[in-house]
């Protein structure tokens, strides 16, 4: 049985592969894909495997996007940090999920279930689409990125998204915390960052800034109908908002 692991945490992927091999020799893990981008490319160049182990929240997006592009019919075991209670209702016949850290006994049961699906040639497409719709409709907030990993002097530091006051583009991308700490962000564009953020909490003010609603100290309107948002200390950045964006920004701010 050919399998694929889609997981952006190398240690988690390695541990999962080790546990799979300890449970059964019938599964050959063809490849470990570390991002949504590499997964999209892989499916363009390869036939779908017999089984997929898939993390829901990847560093560059949500893995559900793959099902918007490709009609995958193989069984999928989602590996996720979602709360188990929130996902219990979605544990349908042709899909399983494992809450991190992955329990070996639960992994064994999930594999056996998927082996039965493959042997009986049961289609899983409908169940996958139902799961995606239910999660997007009922648990949309959970799909947003909870942490960003920054590199400081060759050391990885996790920064909670809830601690981030704003993202800024200035040759490189940076994130600033509410306490004023500044970190370089390893993303090509702020467009990529924006897709991972809860739009109820973060607003794309302009090409240079994405700001958290709680970072705003005041907003100054101008005669030309543009706005200037001043962020709270210690940042004190002045962020311009265009005339075109002003009505939407006011609606976003005025809850």
Image (cartoon, rainbow, N blue to C red):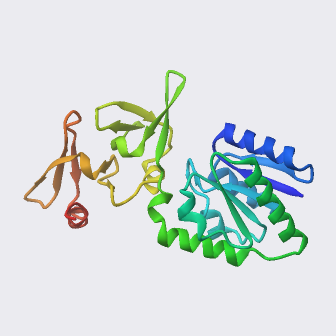
Q: Camera-side residue: 23 or 43?
A: 23
Residue drawn at (39%, 37%) of the image: 174
Task: Give x and y (percent) for residue 11.
Answer: 68, 37
Q: Residue furthest top?
A: 153
Q: Nearer the viewer, residue 56 or 138?
A: 138
Estimate the x, y position of residue 49 in percent, counting from the top left: 82, 60
Q: Is residue 107 left or right of residue 242?
A: right
Name the side, left or right, on which 114 lies relative to 137.
right
Residue 113 seen anywhere in this rendered image of the structure? yes
Residue at the image position 46 percent from the left and 56 percent from the top: 195
121 relative to 175 in the view: left or right: right
Residue at 88% in and 53% down: 27
Using the rendered view, name the quadrant where residue 14 is placed: top right
Furthest-left residue in view? 223
Q: Inspect this view and state whether residue 47 appears.
A: no
* Position of the C terminus by quadrant: bottom left
The image position of residue 87, as x and y in percent, is 58, 64
Q: How many marks?
A: 0
Quarter of the N terminus within the rendering: bottom right
- Residue in the foreground of this view, choosing between 29 and 223: 29
Q: Position of residue 31 (x, y in %)?
A: 79, 48
């Amino acid at each position: 049985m050919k399998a694929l692991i889609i997981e952006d945490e190398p240690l988690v992927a390695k541990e999962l592969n080790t546990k799979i091999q300890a449970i059964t020799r019938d599964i050959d893990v063809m490849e470990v894909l570390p991002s949504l981008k590499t997964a999209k490319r892989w499916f363009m160049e390869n036939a779908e495997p017999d089984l997929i182990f898939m993390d829901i929240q990847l560093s560059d997006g949500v893995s559900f996007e793959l099902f918007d592009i490709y009609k995958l019919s193989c069984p999928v075991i989602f590996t996720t940090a979602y709360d188990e209670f929130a996902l219990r209702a979605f544990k349908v016949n042709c899909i399983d999920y494992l809450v991190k850290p992955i329990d070996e006994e639960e992994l064994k049961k999930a594999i056996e279930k998927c082996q039965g699906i493959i042997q009986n040639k049961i289609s899983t497409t409908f169940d996958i689409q139902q799961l995606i719709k239910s999660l997007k409709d009922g648990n949309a907030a959970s799909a947003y990125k909870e942490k960003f990993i920054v590199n400081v002097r060759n050391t990885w530091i996790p920064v909670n998204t809830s601690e981030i006051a704003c993202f800024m583009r200035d040759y490189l991308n940076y994130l600033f915390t509410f306490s004023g700490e500044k970190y370089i962000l390893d993303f090509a564009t702020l467009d990529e960052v924006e897709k991972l953020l809860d739009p109820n909490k973060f607003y794309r003010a302009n090409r240079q800034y994405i700001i958290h609603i709680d970072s705003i100290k005041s907003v100054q309107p101008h005669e030309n109908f543009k706005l200037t948002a001043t962020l709270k200390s210690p940042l004190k950045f002045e962020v311009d908002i265009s005339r075109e964006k002003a009505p939407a920004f006011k609606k976003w701010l005025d809850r």
